[in-house]
Amino acid sequence: MRQSSRGSCIKVGLVGYGKTGQAVAKIVSESEGVSLQWICRRNSGPVQASLEAIPIFSIYQDRDLAKYLKKASVDCIIDFSAPDALRLYGPIAAAEGISIISANSAHTADEIQFAKSLGEKTQVMCAPNITFGINFLLLAATALHRLAPQVDVAIVEEHFREKTEISGTAKRIASVLGVDEAEIRSLRLGGIIGSHQVVFGFPYQTLRLSHESISREAFGTGAIYAAKLLAQQDVGFYTYDQLLLSYLIEELQRMKGK
Amino acid sequence: MRQSSRGSCIKVGLVGYGKTGQAVAKIVSESEGVSLQWICRRNSGPVQASLEAIPIFSIYQDRDLAKYLKKASVDCIIDFSAPDALRLYGPIAAAEGISIISANSAHTADEIQFAKSLGEKTQVMCAPNITFGINFLLLAATALHRLAPQVDVAIVEEHFREKTEISGTAKRIASVLGVDEAEIRSLRLGGIIGSHQVVFGFPYQTLRLSHESISREAFGTGAIYAAKLLAQQDVGFYTYDQLLLSYLIEELQRMKGK
Amino acid sequence: MRQSSRGSCIKVGLVGYGKTGQAVAKIVSESEGVSLQWICRRNSGPVQASLEAIPIFSIYQDRDLAKYLKKASVDCIIDFSAPDALRLYGPIAAAEGISIISANSAHTADEIQFAKSLGEKTQVMCAPNITFGINFLLLAATALHRLAPQVDVAIVEEHFREKTEISGTAKRIASVLGVDEAEIRSLRLGGIIGSHQVVFGFPYQTLRLSHESISREAFGTGAIYAAKLLAQQDVGFYTYDQLLLSYLIEELQRMKGK
Amino acid sequence: MRQSSRGSCIKVGLVGYGKTGQAVAKIVSESEGVSLQWICRRNSGPVQASLEAIPIFSIYQDRDLAKYLKKASVDCIIDFSAPDALRLYGPIAAAEGISIISANSAHTADEIQFAKSLGEKTQVMCAPNITFGINFLLLAATALHRLAPQVDVAIVEEHFREKTEISGTAKRIASVLGVDEAEIRSLRLGGIIGSHQVVFGFPYQTLRLSHESISREAFGTGAIYAAKLLAQQDVGFYTYDQLLLSYLIEELQRMKGK
């Protein structure tokens, strides 16, 4: 991981406190280089004991919304809520120059457009899957596909029984590799947290890139990594894999130079 | 794969006709863009029926060695024999400007040094494992390790029961990733052709890059791919993964530009 | 493997000499405890050099068919040809008391019925996949499904690009586990010989049983194993997994007794 | 799963409230057919909110120990504490006819002997890994090894970085399969909860049995399954896999009879 500038600590506001939001809150509050300033949630309910000192409010009801959304309060908003929240806090945050990481799994084209418009004033990132591992897998698979375009490719994803829709991450991989969404092989089994595998079938060899999620905390470490990367960028609209791509190219060039 | 210049066909001489050499001969003789001109082998014995028209000779005994090793005869020598053969044919081939692909699995430092000296006169490549898949895996693993150096890494290799030594490919992966050779996990089981897996263990996610060999023919397609890449390079000494790295960086830059 | 009676050697006639038949011929001719007596093939064409001394004929054309199909000639017919061949050689073989292993991958209900009628006179086995590994996997998966019927189950099969239909083995697994055929996940990729995986998803754990074919020779060792098992049975109709089931129960009872 | 007698509910006392004990407490308190009566822990500390109504005491300090260890209080003790606890509560529990499940991962020969002596008065089970999946894997691997003893076998286990010792489960698998402990391949990587794989290498095929733990809650469902099985047994000493073996043989015999 890149070093953030020495001694700095990124002040984070967290939007969304569902299952994933809770895991992210735990990781952000425990990690170095970031500091959790507040949590914004839709509904009321109990909070993890360790976070009881953190202010909590609701974008949907709080009259003093603006006071939380100030540069003085936070440097970066990490959003694991529903996609519509961005319309509520986005303009105020952008005006304040607060960077935004929208980690919702399914943005519409309209929402992406809206996020891009915010990117004229601050750093904005949309990341349907914000784990480092998935984004690396996406880049590696894309690179391999471009180097060997004639090679057969298949995408397999496994998730817990209750997940009805196809994984958004798998769809994104399919889109980048030019695989028809209908060709994604989805398995729904017991309590599997989440796994994605891209298989490349050559005539005499097979290459597999696979990613297994152990727990939702991965989204927390991914969001922190993204926040640190974003802090070093100019104002603009970014995706996680594009940012990672820039660093990947830099590293490969260093490897070549050796 | 890069296009070789239109209409061209690379004339290939094959040194080594053991199990791997035979599979390579089959693939080279059947593939477009390359043409098998002769086979050089240590011992006598039967040849595949489809190759009966190909001249066969021995570097160790043939008085007319020089006549085969001429630019007029071949553009590229692909060598799957023992490492010492390079000393016999190398100087003549280099003087003729014939490119050399030495695909032996275990070169000593001395042999590498000798190969580098030949690289002053022609294009020379040393490749302990010449499959596209393994070299891509090596690059992807190295890149990931550089982007996330603190992440745990393990190397697992599986081969057939009779293979006593640790896989040379696994050793190369270990060396590049800074893993102690003693940490390689080797499994020897039945008739497994060969598999290599690099596992990256993050706190909340796991990433696996794995390669399975289906048959020795993979070395043939890899050697042809290498011969075509090499035909586009300047005189010099190359490794497969370095050459692939250059193309990978080019592709990633195109991806970024999109 | 069970010991066949001391000193005995099963005389085998092989019907079918396509890609699989050739691999089986090689294994049967090289293995102990069996002896390849003749090969019966539909079309003419070259034969492996090592088998040149073996008589070859065609069921479809040979006038002297009956002379080959005699108990004096063979103890067991191993059939990797098309399903219709059984109607030609079956009645003669059954009358002679020659045991029959029909290893075709897709028998119709009619053909199974016909095979059962032959089972009134000799030992007959139908085995859509005759490898030991697949049949063990089938038994283990069935047993697990019966012990834990509420657990989610998925079937994944991978084969080479050119295989258009769903694997017959996967269909059989699905049928036994009560999984809808439409739920089988099929991947078609490069040159993968064949792999089958059954995944059991529990709420907090996942169990995978997987089988990978390395080469068609597996059918040869499986057929020999089957021939030896069958030699110890009474006249009747058998499937490979049923026979294996009997031995499995015996072994488990020995384990329990320990 | 076998049905327990209608309407019955097994009253459970839980010994041990470390990370695993907490996960087990959660599952036992939420599951049908069992009822969590008390928790016994070594140290004080906070308890899950949902368990606040459950009595908590310490075997090491409580003067009224005997009152908890009464048949009137519980039917079964599930123990995920340290092995030495059994010596404290075991004799009292056995005298009361309370069944005991000792799920510690490393019992010494002495402790096993002590547990067997308790098995003269009540039902006692020692289970180094109490998940259904691992015990099924153990049985399936053992059966396969007995049916095909000449086949190569390897054991691979993966766990989180901090786990220094070889997995007790892997050692047990090795012992049953006659594999030298030194041959176990252990990978220590990031946050992997736990995975075990047994690989069988045939000359032309490979069979893999693998188990992945998703979370410690698997120990809870396994313990409940064990408690229900144990409730149907006579007084005696049992291991989880032996009990499962009996049910497996029964199911296989039903399969055969079909």
Image (cartoon, coloured by chain):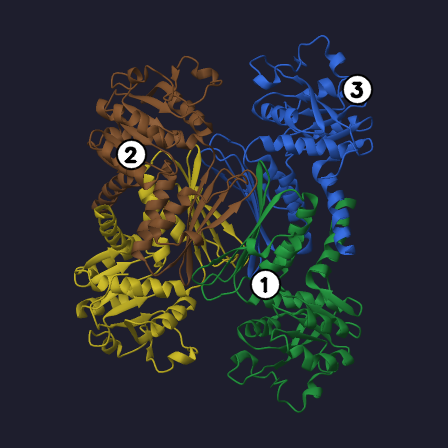
Chain colours: A brown, B yellow, C green, D blue
The answer to whether residue D78 is left or right of residue A2 is right
Marks 3/1 in contact by CB < 8 Å: the verdict is no
Query: Which residue is tagged 2?
Result: A125
- Which residue: 59% across, 23% down? D22
Q: Nearer the viewer, mark 1 or mark 2?
A: 2
The answer to which image quadrant residue B62 occupies is bottom left
Residue at the extreme top:
D63
Q: Nearer the viewer, mark 3 or mark 1?
A: 1
Query: Which residue is tagged 3?
Result: D71
Residue B199 shows in this picture: no
Q: Report the front residue among D10 and A105.
A: A105
Marks 3/2 in contact by CB < 8 Å: the verdict is no
Query: Which residue is tagged 1?
Result: C168
Mark 2: which secondary structure?
Answer: strand
Measured as percent of width and height from the top left, residue D98 is found at 78, 23
Q: CA distance from mark 1 to mark 2?
A: 47 Å
Chain of the residue displaying label 1:
C
The answer to whether residue A4 is left or right of residue A191 is left
- Up the image or down, C63 lies above or below D164; here it is below
Three-letter amino acid code at the position of disc 2:
Met
The answer to whether residue A125 is left or right of residue C13 is left
Chain of the residue displaying label 2:
A
Q: How many other residues sit within 10 Å of disc 3, few (<14), some (14-19) or many (≥20)?
A: some
